[in-house]
Structures are given as C-alpha cells and as structure tokens.
C-alpha cells in the first residue's frame, strides 16, 4: 500500500436489481485493490426516507447506515415503507480516507392500503337515511383508486323487518370520502364496512354499526269516516290501528283540545303538538286547553273499533270526562312508538284537518305544521260564525297525504358514571283530528 493513500474513488454502478413494496435489492461494481488501495477497507450503505405523520402530525425522516460484508457487491434493504422514495448512498473507506458516492433515489412499489381508522368514521342517522364520512388511510401505501362500502341490516326494532338483510356494495371514487345511504328501514341497525383500494388491491376493512332513527307511526285515514253517534256530552268515533315505522306501536292516546274563538284566530304556525301526557285534572289546574282523555294499549285495537269520547270511564289512569255541549273540541288520535336509546328524542307528528260549518256552508282550513314552527298554509282560521243550533260534529277530511312531525330533544341524564334513559320518552307519533262545527 502506498503510504497515506485513500481509496481511489467512490463506488459506481449503484442500481436496483429487485424492487418490491417493502424491500429493495441493490447492486454495484465489484471491489478491487486498485480501487480500495488497501486490503483493509469497509463499505457502508446509508439510506433515508420520509414518512408522513399520522393525524396531521409532522413528517418524520428515517436515517440509517449499514455495514456491508467484505467483498460484497449486493445488499437488500427490508422493512421499507411502500410507495416511498428511498435515498441511498455508498461510502468506501480505508484507514487513510473515505470516498462517498452520489445519492441515488429509488421508489418502492405500491402495496395494499392500510386500514381506515375506525375513529375517523362519522355518521348522521335519519329514519331512512344515513350520511357517512371517513378519512383516507393513514398509510395509503400507494395511490388510492377507489373506496368500497358494504352495508347490511343485522337487527331491527321493527318486527316486520327481516334480518339479516341482503348485503349490498357501493363503489366510490378516490376523492369521495362520504356516502348517503338511502331507502333504509327505520329503527334498524346496519353493519357498515369501508375499505380503500390501490393498484395492489383492497386494504383492511373498517367496521361500524349504525342504527337509523325510528319514524312516526302512520294511519290509514284516506277515507275519514263520519262520527258513528253523538249525544250532548259524547261523540263516538272509529279508531283505526296505526302502522309502526321502525318500532311497533307501544300505545295510543285520545287527546282532547278545547277550541275557543281566541284560539281559532291565532296563527296556524303556533299550533302545538302533544308529546307530554296530561290528564283532565292537570289541564284544568294549569289552564291548558288539551288533555289525554284515554290511553289504549295496542292489543285493544287489533282492527278498526269504535270509541266513545266522553263516556265518563277511565282508561289507563286517564278520565274520559264528559264533553261540555256548549264548547267546541278537537279530538286527536295519537300513536306512539318507543325506542331504547342513550338519549331521549320525542317526535310528535301532527296532521290537523279542520272543518267548521256556518249557517249555510262549511268552512275548511288545512292546518299543516312542521315542528310547531313552520307555517305551511299561510293564513289564519276565520272566526267561528255562531248559529242558534248546538255544535255539530264533522269529520276531518284526509285530503293531504304528507305527515309532518314535531320534535323535542332532551340530553341524557347523567348519574355518576352511568347514563340513565327513559324508554318511553324516545318515541314518535302521528295525530289525526276530528273537529266539531258550530
């Protein structure tokens, strides 16, 4: 060896002999004495790459230098990240000095993507729809080409729904990280999966279970019947069973509301729903114009049946008090469905069709309100035209098939580390109205 002679030059010919998604096989020129200038020498392979920080964090650069075996001209790097640029440099050193080669960049191939983080799945359930959002996998491992969503009903509080249902699949474009599921069943739990795809295939699936809200029961009163009979203090009407949507009907109520001239003149948009039970005595004490006159179990109404309002009997604790022949009343028939949940959400759907008769003709006003706030039919009811004859009961006419709802939402009751909930406060209802004419 010549005294004080360092390697003649850096190693050349650094190239990839095999590129995979997570490993890189490298090769370079063979070593010879005229290059090393010494029998004692070493070859080091240094590489670096940068990875993106998860959750929006800072990027991280990984650096490492590895010793290559004596006389070796090949080396394989393992456990590399897919679809990343790997920057490699060779160094040749002897006791007298060191020569570094130029840095060469190689890119690993794509791999199947990592899983979508379950915590990134956010959703908004409605009664027949679910809006779902998600985030790209923290480790895409390549270019995302599409997302695949699968969903299947696995449980339902509606006994009329067959579960498990068929499994359905939806494909989304690479830039679509959201989906609106439609035509779902109310009160039904769906198992939903989301996975991403690259050119190498699909990645791990993220799973979640989402339950749709129950909806208000509906009535079939397309041909509203006339009152069956009446006296000065009673009115007999035909009650028809309701159809639950998302949960079976748990109870029926017959609600009475006294109509006054002052109330008739109010704006239609201020019409209230009746989500909270109130007896006749409580209504009198509070000065409230409406009260529950009867509460009926679903078993008492397997089919259309007559019911006499004002028969002076008690139904599940509610007194069906006789009606005052000098007053006008609205008679509502209401159905409710209960749904167990960790929050309470009272939704009362109300459809009121009001008929009032003058001396020579009927006056009809359609009161259709949503949430007790939206004024759908923008005018007020006309004042009653008094006649010398007693009020006459007239049936409401179902001329509109749209059901509207009022909603009252309350937060959960926290008891220490537990959450208390009232099963009977998570309910939906639909109301029908029969009005007297005067």
Image (tube, grey):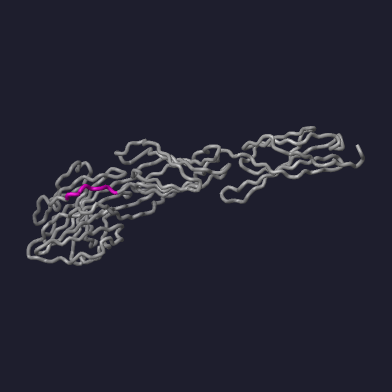
Side of 137 where 153 appears, left or right: left
Q: Estimate the x, y position of residue 184 in percent, counting from the top left.
A: 35, 44
Image quadrant in which you'd find residue 22: top right
Q: Which residues are magenta?
A: 216-223
Whole-percent x and y of residue 356? 15, 61
Q: Is residue 157 above or below residue 356?
A: above
Q: Is residue 417 in sight in this rendering?
A: no
How many labels, in total?
0
Q: Give the side of residue 227 with respect to residue 138, left or right.
A: left
Residue 126 magenta: no
Farthest right residue in view: 3
- Point out the image quarter for the C terminus: bottom left
* Res 21 quadrant in image: top right
Farthest left residue in view: 389
Secondary structure that dominates the magenta span: loop
Residue 123 position (above or below residue 15): below
Q: Is residue 356 left or right of residue 151?
A: left
- Which of the 4 quarters of the picture holds residue 324? bottom left
Residue 219: in magenta span: yes
Q: Is residue 143 visible?
A: yes
Residue at the spot 31% in from the left edge and 57% down from the top edge: 371
Residue 110 image offset from top left, x and y in percent: 59, 39
- Residue 239: where, in percent of width, then height? 18, 47
């Amino acid at each position: 060896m010549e005294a004080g002679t360092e390697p003649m030059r850096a190693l050349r010919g650094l190239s990839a002999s095999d590129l995979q998604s997570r490993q890189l096989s490298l090769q370079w020129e063979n070593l010879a004495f005229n290059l090393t200038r010494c029998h004692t020498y070493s070859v080091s392979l240094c590489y670096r790459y940068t990875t993106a920080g998860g959750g929006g964090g800072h990027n991280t650069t990984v650096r490492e230098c590895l010793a290559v075996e004596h006389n070796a001209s090949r080396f394989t790097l393992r456990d590399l990240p897919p679809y990343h640029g790997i920057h490699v440099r060779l160094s040749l050193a002897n006791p007298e000095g060191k020569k570094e080669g130029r840095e060469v960049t190689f890119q690993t191939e794509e791999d199947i993507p990592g899983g979508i983080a379950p915590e990134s799945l956010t959703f908004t359930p409605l009664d027949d729809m679910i809006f779902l959002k998600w985030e790209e996998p923290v480790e895409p491992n390549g270019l995302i080409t599409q997302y695949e969503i699968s969903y299947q009903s696995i449980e339902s509080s509606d006994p009329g729904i067959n579960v498990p249902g068929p499994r359905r699949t939806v494909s989304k474009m690479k830039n679509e990280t959201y989906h609106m599921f439609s035509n779902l069943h109310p009160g039904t739990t769906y198992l939903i999966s989301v996975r991403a795809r690259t050119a190498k295939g699909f990645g791990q699936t993220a799973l979640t279970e989402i339950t749709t809200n129950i909806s208000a029961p509906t009535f079939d009163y397309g041909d509203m019947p006339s009152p069956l009979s009446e006296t000065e203090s009673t009115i007999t009407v035909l009650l028809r069973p309701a159809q639950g949507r998302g949960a079976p009907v748990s109870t029926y109520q017959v609600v009475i509301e006294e109509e006054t001239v002052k109330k008739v003149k109010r704006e239609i948009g201020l019409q209230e729903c009746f989500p909270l039970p109130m007896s006749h005595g409580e209504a009198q004490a509070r000065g409230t114009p409406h009260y529950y006159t009867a509460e009926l179990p679903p078993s008492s109404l397997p089919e259309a049946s007559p019911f006499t309002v004002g028969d002076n009997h008690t139904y599940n604790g509610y007194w069906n008090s006789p009606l005052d022949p000098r007053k006008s009343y609205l008679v509502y028939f209401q159905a409710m469905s209960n749904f167990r949940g960790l929050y309470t959400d009272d939704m009362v759907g109300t459809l009121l069709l009001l008929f009032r008769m003058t001396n020579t003709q009927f006056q009809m006003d359609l009161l259709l309100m949503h949430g007790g706030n939206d004024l759908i039919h923008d005018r007020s009811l006309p004042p009653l035209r008094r006649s010398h004859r007693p009020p006459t009961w007239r049936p409401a006419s179902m001329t509109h098939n749209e059901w509207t709802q009022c909603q009252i939402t309350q937060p959960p009751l926290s008891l220490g580390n537990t959450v208390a909930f009232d099963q009977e406060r998570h309910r939906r209802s639909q109301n029908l109205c029969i009005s007297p004419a005067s």
